[in-house]
Image: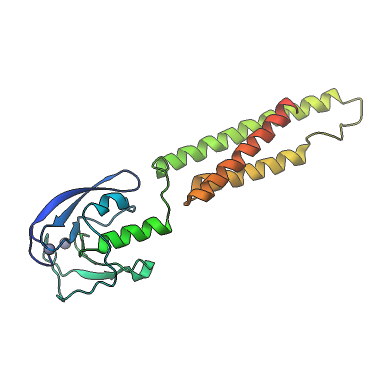
Amino acid sequence: MKCPLCEGEFETVELRTVGARTVDAKHCTQCGGFWLERSLEEPLMPEWVAQYDTPQPNYSLKASDLFCPIDDSRLEQVDGNIDSAGSRYWQCNDCRGQFYPKGQLALLTNHQAKTNPRVPALATNRGRAAMGISLVAVLFVGVMASFNRFNYQLNAASNSPLPTTGPNVYTLILLALAYIAGTVLAVLGRKLPLIITGWAVIAVCMLGFAVVIFGP
Ligand SMILES: [Zn+2]
Ligand SMILES: [Zn+2]
């Protein structure tokens, strides 16, 4: 397999995605281009790309036609300006392979890292789903326990006027709504500040539930 740009030899290099997945890329020893067997499902970690590539903006290619090193199809140019990274790469519509000339993979990766600060490796889609389900389960338990507490209060106060101070059903509804909003942020948040806000809201709401259930 030869480089589609300069026909140089490829060496296999290992790159890592932000989700800690390994990507085996081909790196041209002559022109510094990269061949990826398929498009990336998630961004690469800039530190890994930086071992082999440095960003090179405003890249222009001298050769006009590039052909896929796997199946010889004509590669189609993709302009990274769509996502404002400004990187240029070429894609095979048959095998989905991609060729990034020197500097373009680093340009794209650094741009992605800047616009989308790294989400902890824990937050894979499966991790997010599990986290969402457990948070909703905690909410359910909190609400049920709080209602038990209210029933107990109502029974105890059946012969006397309802207590006007202390937590009431509206407090509980408000807590539940805030908790759900926090859960949405924590589970679906793509940026670290949002996720932290979500968890902070959840923590405050849990404290609220604890006060409702066990008394101040
Ligand atoms: Zn090359
Ligand atoms: Zn191909």
What sort of colour scheme is used for the picture?
A: rainbow
Q: Is residue 95 above or below residue 84?
A: above
70 sits to left or right of 152: left
Q: Looking at the picture, how far across and down is residue 198, in whole percent?
A: 56, 45
Q: Residue at x 16, y 56 (%)?
A: 27
Residue in the foreground of this view, choosing between 110 and 69: 110
Q: Is residue 124 above or below residue 153?
A: below
Quadrant the N terminus occupies: bottom left
Q: Is residue 125 visible?
A: yes
Q: Looking at the picture, how far across and down is residue 5, in whole percent?
A: 13, 67
Query: Residue extending furthest top?
Result: 156
74 sits to left or right of 161: left
Q: Is residue 143 visible?
A: no
Quadrant the C terminus occupies: top right
Image quarter where ligand 1 lies: bottom left
Q: Is residue 143 above or below residue 181?
A: above
Q: Residue at x 24, y 63 (%)?
A: 103
Q: Looking at the picture, how far across and down is residue 188, in whole percent?
A: 49, 48
Q: Is residue 110 above or below residue 135?
A: below
Query: In the rendered picture of this protein, how many numbered marks are placed on residues?
Result: 0
Q: Residue at x 68, y 28 (%)?
A: 145
Q: Looking at the picture, how far across and down is residue 180, in whole percent?
A: 60, 44
Q: Residue at x 48, y 52 (%)?
A: 191
21 sits to left or right of 166: left
